[in-house]
Amino acid sequence: MNDLNATAEARTVVETMGAAARLAAAELRRASTAAKNRALDVAAQTLVDREKTILAANARDVKGARANGSDDAFIDRLKLTAKGVEEMAEGLRQIARLPDPVGEVTDLRFRPSGIQVGHMRVPLGVVGIIYESRPDVTADAGGLCLKSGNAAILRGGSEAMHSNQAIAQCLAAGLKAAGLPDAAIQLVPTTDRAVVGELLAAEKYLDVIIPRGGKSLVARIAKEARVPVIKHLDGVCHVYVDDGADPAMALAIVENAKTQRYGTCNTMETLLVAQGAATATLPSIGRMFAEKGVEVRACEASRRVLEAAGFRAVQPATEDDWFAEYLAPIVAIRVVAGLDEAMAHIAKYGSQHTDAIVTPDFGRAQRFLREVDSASVMVNASTRFADGFEYGLGAEIGISTNKLHARGPVGLEGLTSRKWIVLGDGHVRG
């Protein structure tokens, strides 16, 4: 098949799905909370009932990925277990138990003219999700879009096609049981890459696109999309240990932020330590990293402290290390003069994702909260808390570093917008 034929077929796929999604979105706007919750609950139970089928489909995907030379980190993101299937089901149950944001009226107040003016929360419409490797995104994204009243078009990666199809069939069973339109959640049925380009240009059908995947995928979508995008490119997250920080607290937070999981976007990549706190905190932090096999790349000042404490295998940090999102057992460490230099470092090298301060000083904590321009800013807590579930949103559809509309973990509310409503009783403007 030549490129022209492939593009024409991809456009037909997107136009057909997009038109169906538009009709489904109109139905979902008037769907009851009870119907949406029933669809989610039935889909969750169907996931559990079809566990063996889902795992068999996933095994085919994993086998194919290994044959194509995918590395262990990729396989880890792709592979499902019985526990993972149950977690997907529980995620849908949790979404069903969350308050329905659609139709919520807020800020209603009388104006001098006698009219009442307020806001109503409404769905975005049709949401396109383009993602790689992680098949659990199919359940999370489909469930969140449904509860928030949006039709979803899901384009997973070719490496997870069998898994995604098996999961999407469970969602379809939920929609059918609740009497909701089949097109409310659609999985793109082809692995043709031309479909991605067509989705990015589908302004007529899509209201927003959310990419979930590696930096190259997100960068491409952000560059080429003619549809609004909710995204983040990097997770260059920092923990700053301030003067006077409790060493035990600093150690616990740094250990969790870096080593609980290495491959997540909310994992700490750079540790900043105030000069006055370096001697009290860095040796124990260095021992922890050594015990866990974390490679340390350090500035000259932090290398001196670490080497004085007996750590000889510390690599010098380069300028590139301060920009790096390692997603691996590697950490950059820098000693700074204090709070101002720490915030200047974060502003220069950070990705506006998640940054934390460890401090006993209320005033400095408040400055950090106000002045660090990131989607999540934390005091005396691990960056790993930057997560929709931990924030009480249920499953998240992604984390946004955008400054307009949604910022930080995107849950149900982030998949809606607000419109103005006016209530009168025959009022006319004089």
Image (spheres, helix red, strand yellow):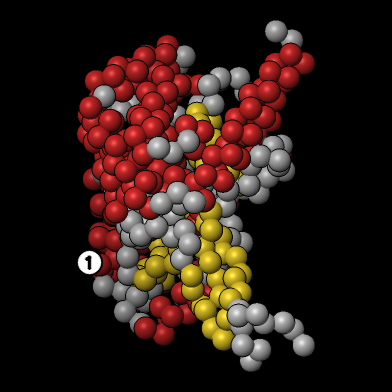
Marks counted in the figure total: 1
The residue positioned 29% from the left and 50% from the top of the image is 94
In this rendering, the answer to whether 379 lies above or below 124 is below
Q: Is residue 396 left or right of residue 403?
A: left
Query: Along the line of sight, which residue is nearer the eye, 226 or 100?
Result: 100
The residue positioned 50% from the left and 28% from the top of the image is 187
The residue positioned 25% from the left and 60% from the top of the image is 252
* Element type at mark 1: helix
Q: Which residue is mark 1?
A: 248
Q: Mark 1 Cα within 10 Å, few/some/many (few <14, many 20+)?
A: few
In this rendering, the answer to whether 127 lies above or below 298 is above
In this rendering, the answer to whether 423 lies above or below 166 is below
Query: Along the line of sight, which residue is nearer the eye, 308 or 16?
Result: 16
Q: What percent of the width, then of the height, locates residue 231?
A: 56, 49
Q: Find the residue positioned furthest to the front.
A: 426
The residue positioned 59% from the left and 71% from the top of the image is 421
Amino acid identity at mark 1: Ala
Q: What percent of the width, then of the height, locates residue 200?
A: 67, 37
